[in-house]
């Protein structure tokens, strides 16, 4: 199934991230749920400071 997701292209890119674009939003192929699993539709998401520590490699 097709989904849209944020993908970390590379850690440690220069700031400002607006120009170096370490994260892209792409259409991805995802396996469907297995028996006993559920599919959840997410309406919105965000980035917090701990996510930024992964982006900058700290």
Image (cartoon, grey):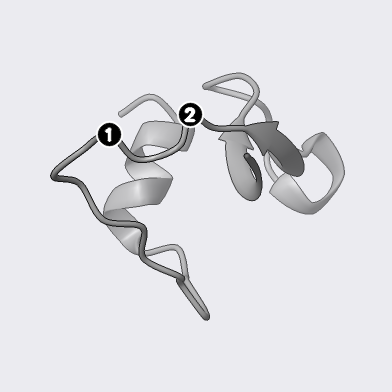
Camera-side residue of 29 and 50: 29
Question: Which residue is rendered at x = 36% and y = 65% of the image?
Answer: 40
Question: Which residue is rendered at x = 60% and y = 35% of the image?
Answer: 7
Disc on res. 31:
2
Q: Residue 7 vs residue 19: left or right?
A: left
Vertical comparison of 8 with 47: above or below: above
**Image quadrant occupied by the N terminus:** top right
| Label 2 SS | loop
**In this view, which residue lies farthest toward the bottom?**
43
**In this view, which residue lies farthest toward the left?**
36
Give residue 12's position: percent from left, percent from top.
54, 22
**In this view, which residue lies farthest toward the front?**
35
Camera-side residue of 9 and 29: 29
> Counting other residues with Cα less than 10 Å from the Cα at mark 1, is it few (<14), some (14-19), or many (20 or more)?
few
| Label 1 SS | loop
Q: Residue 2 vs residue 34: left or right?
A: right
Q: Residue 36 vs residue 4: left or right?
A: left
Question: Which residue is rendered at x = 60% and y = 45% of the image?
Answer: 6
Camera-side residue of 28 and 22: 28
Res. 15 in view: yes
Res. 16 in view: no
Question: Which residue is rendered at x = 39% and y = 24% of the image?
Answer: 57
Give residue 19's position: percent from left, percent from top.
86, 44
Count of picture labels: 2
Asked whether the beta carbons under mark 2 and mark 1 sit within 8 Å of each other, the answer is yes
Give residue 30's position: percent from left, percent from top.
54, 32
Q: Nearer the viewer, mark 2 or mark 1?
A: 1
**Image quadrant occupied by the C terminus:** top left
Camera-side residue of 23 and 17: 23
> Counting other residues with Cα less than 10 Å from the Cα at mark 2, is it few (<14), some (14-19), or many (20 or more)?
few
Disc on res. 34:
1
Vertical comparison of 7 with 51: above or below: above
């Amino acid at each position: 199934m097709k989904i849209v997701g944020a993908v970390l292209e590379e850690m440690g890119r220069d700031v400002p991230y607006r120009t170096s674009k370490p994260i892209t939003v792409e259409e991805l192929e995802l396996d469907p749920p297995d028996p006993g699993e559920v599919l959840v539709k997410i309406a919105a998401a965000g980035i917090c400071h701990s996510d930024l520590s992964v982006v900058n490699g700290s």
